[in-house]
Amino acid sequence: MLGRQVFLDSLLAHGATKIFGNPGTTETPLLDNLMDYPDLEYIFHLHEGVAVGAANFYAQASNSTAVASMHVAPGLGNAIGMMYGALKNHSPMIVTAGAQDTRIRLADPLLGHDLVSMAKPVTKWSVQVEHADEMAAIMQRAFKIANEHPKGPVFVALPINVMEQETKFSATTAGFLKNRGLASAETLDQLADLIRNSKSIGIVAGDDVVTSGSRQALVALSEKIGAGVHLEIVCGQFPFPSRHPHFLGRVGPDGAAHRDVLGEYDTVLLVGGPFFEDVWHSEVSPFADAVTLIQIEPTESRLAHNFQLTLGIAADIKDTLERLLKLVGNEIIYDERCKALKKHYLTRKEDAESQFAKAKERSPMTPARAMYELGRALPDNVVISEESITAAPDVHRNFDVGGKTAFYAPRGGGIGHGLCGCLGVAVAHQGEQVVAISGDGSAMYSIQGLWTAAYHKLKILFVILSNREYRILKHNMNNYRRRFDVKSNGPYVFMDLTEPCLNFVGMAEGMGVPGRKVDNPTDIANAVSEALTMEGPYILDLVVEGLDPN
């Protein structure tokens, strides 16, 4: 058999059904043989970064290992930023790139480069197959490493001549690997004692709560012990329902901001995440000085990575939370905390509604008004792919995120993931209505994704919040000036998307996607109704207000 056959057989052996790719010359051994593999569907993209961004979200939405195919050095270079995003999202992925014929490598061939070194900083493992005899073993190891916690992308370079070499070694898998241990009864008793003895307790939840299937167990624990639940500043999936009275929002960008929301707790439980990925330096500890700090992770690698723990548990998250629920008892203080959280929730809700009413009629509409109208017009069971950044809290308030509404978002801090990520979400959620919410600046990083949506007739409603600026950069400019005591009343330089303004409906039309521009919030419902009748994608360009320079 040939190397290319072993490669494609390896994908099938590991359960892969999709290849997200942008074709190139060195990928011809793969493309020319796909007709012989009808169980492998090729998702066609116009840019390598868009393909990897789609594969990243597909891995999250399908809870499986995604496969992305790049083209030699320039193509891999185009994909590096999105590979970084996949690494931060902890998405299990096999990213491949066709490589030049190894027999001409000393001649510095066109498109040739050290692909392994290029990919290494943004992957868990980076390797080139040097002979077809290595193909089966490398692919087996690649899938295994991609799925070891914390999960992430692996890169495999596939020289064109190696794909055509003969080998006697057929595709193999690592077999069934059980890599989640269970917490001992003694450990769980110790954990339950710490919770029973707490006066005030808060939980910070990460994405692994979702990937481990533990969200319901976390909700039950929160309701039992009266714990408020916070999320990380960025989360790829939503570990706790946004409409739940115990949901207290996301922690901030630095230690001081964490302390503002976590400093009143004498006990803090960290569950399933890389706590914390800060944006700014702060010398302030996130926690009270004498805090009881507990962390639960699937493996030991994340325990006490940044903070000294009172108790760290490396064990299956779902099993740990479900067994803990039976051990914490029924303390009087639990009910008192639940009542306090409900009262706080109602106060926050009333304040938010008051603030919303004051700004409801502003023109251009606020992002909050846009999301309010969108939330009213859409059913709760839509699937959201979100990269609205500064408008994210408005999304969380107006949709049942983490409840009835499935949710996917980028973690890496870069932009451009939303408009391509929704492609992978739509492939994973075939037949369901996907809503991709993106800022206008973010959308321009991967606007080619509209073409793929049209080509594959994906049921995606693209919602662009057009504030005609990089609003997050303006916020961060203000932060920079304040944090470094920079005395400046200067303008926001190169942060406005005007002169000319972007015409998203026109761009979409050129790629086969119909749509409407909406600047009156009362027109959103009709536009959504029209969009929901479409068999394929549709775009709404919502004109919203920008950041007030005052």
Image (cartoon, helix red, strand yellow):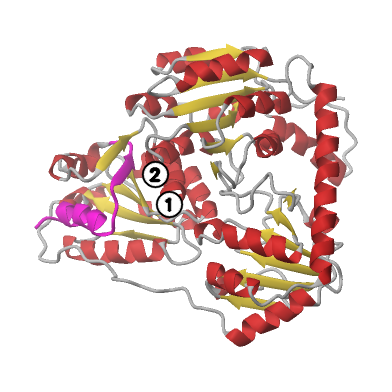
Res 273 quadrant in image: bottom right
Q: Amino acid at mark 1?
A: Met
Q: Residue furthest bottom?
A: 186
> Visible in this render: residue 37?
yes
Q: Secondary structure at mark 1?
A: helix
In the displayed structure, 185 sits above or below 27; it is below
Depth check: give the residue in front, 426 or 1: 426
Label 1–label 2 contact, CB within 8 A: yes
Residue at 70% in and 48% down: 244
Residue 481 appears at what percent x and percent y?
A: 84, 39
Res 214 quadrant in image: bottom right
What residue did someone put label 2 on? 76
Depth check: give the residue in front, 128 or 183: 183
Residue at 28% in and 48% down: 17
Q: Magenta stretch: give its range.
A: 1-23
Q: Is residue 117 left or right of residue 202?
A: left
Residue 267 appears at what percent x and percent y?
A: 79, 70
Residue 308 appears at what percent x and percent y?
A: 73, 75
Residue at 56% in and 44% down: 410
Depth check: give the residue in front, 239 or 295: 239
Q: Secondary structure at mark 2?
A: helix
* Marks 1, 2: nearer the viewer: 2
Question: Is 421 included in the stretch rendered in magenta?
Answer: no
What residue did someone put label 1 on? 118
Residue 210 appears at what percent x and percent y?
A: 54, 56
**Which quadrant of the figure contains the C terminus?**
top right
In the displayed structure, 3 sits above or below 481; it is below
Q: Earlier in the sequence, mark 1 or mark 2?
A: 2
> Visible in this render: residue 549?
no
In the displayed structure, 154 sits above or below 74; it is below
Instruction: Count neighbours of disc 2 (C-alpha within 10 A) and say few if under 14, some if 14 to 19, many if 20 or more.
Output: many
Q: Amino acid at mark 2?
A: Leu
